[in-house]
Amino acid sequence: MDNKEKFGHIHPLSRVASRISEIFSEMGFSLIDGPEIETEYYNFDALNVPKDHPARDMWDTFWLKRKDILETQNSKLLLRTHTSPVQIRYMENNRPPLRIISIGKTFRYEATDATHEAQFHQVEGLLVDKGMSLANLKYVIKEFFEKFFEEKVELRLRPSYFPFVEPGVEIDVSCFKCGGGKCAICKHTGWIEVMGAGMIHPDVLKNVGLNPEDWKGFAFGGGVDRLAMLKYGIDDVRLFYTGDLRLVNQFL
């Protein structure tokens, strides 16, 4: 009979979240938390996504009903669709220079498959200071991914649209597995899409009382679940949430 004491294991998502926090902490970022139940104002309006704006179609939202208050536009409650509201709340109560990240659960009403879940984890970062540019963003992100994947990587920034940044970019990293477009992870392109990012939109800065003529900043965000899948070679995001110990026990 095996009398050895059995120990629990850190879940791979917790392991990845901890490593992300550690890397950004080394670069001077503070880890900030915020509520998972948010108001429409912080989740959309303050982030330059006004009511009826077509950009809201990007997120299918879990709306919550409250009978104890009279709902107004700013008090309507929802499960946050991203962790960006944490940045708004922090900027409202703190003055630049600012350097923060937030890691937490987010929720979107969408079909579940191998790469999508209704509940998942995001990491988002924010840096506000004098004279920031996309060059500063690129340096920070490159530094992060080289430490996270423990490999030298190249970055590719592609123009994209997000309502809370201008300009907005999609960030790709060179494939850390094959290095040349020879594997399924990069779909034989040599590049892996990992994050969305950009320079903070002037209207977002104004919404938190900052003058965009005085302060510039950048923001970035990506899925913790996706980063864990890439790092550990897991091909189905649903495996993280089944409670199957055959997965968890691989992470001592």
Image (cartoon, rainbow, N blue to C red):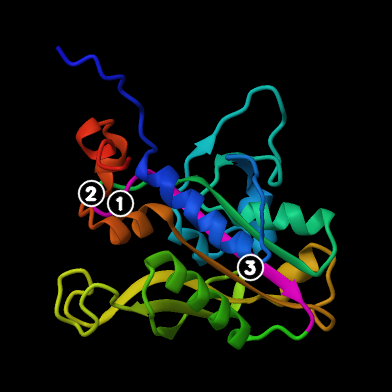
How would you rate the neighbour count of disc 3 (Cα within 10 Å): few for under 14, some for 14-19, many for 20 or more?
few
Dots 2, 1 in contact, CB < 8 A:
yes
Task: Give the mark nearer the N terminus: 3 vs 1.
Answer: 3
Would residue 232 appear left or right of 162 to someone viewing this image?
Answer: left
Nearest to the observer: residue 178 or residue 133: 178
Farthest top residue? Answer: 1
Quarter of the rendering occupied by the N terminus: top left
Q: Which residue is mark 2?
A: 113
Residue designated by label 3? 27
Residue 218 found in image quarter: bottom right
Q: Which residues are magenta?
A: 114-130
In the rendered image of this protein, does residue 17 appear above or below residue 170?
above
Q: Residue at x 26, y 36 (%)?
A: 249
Which amino acid type corresponds to the residue marked 3 in the rendered image? Met
> Magenta region's main secondary structure?
strand
The structure residue drawn at horizontal position 73% and vertical position 52%, both measured from the top left corner, is 89
State whether residue 54 appears in this view.
Answer: yes
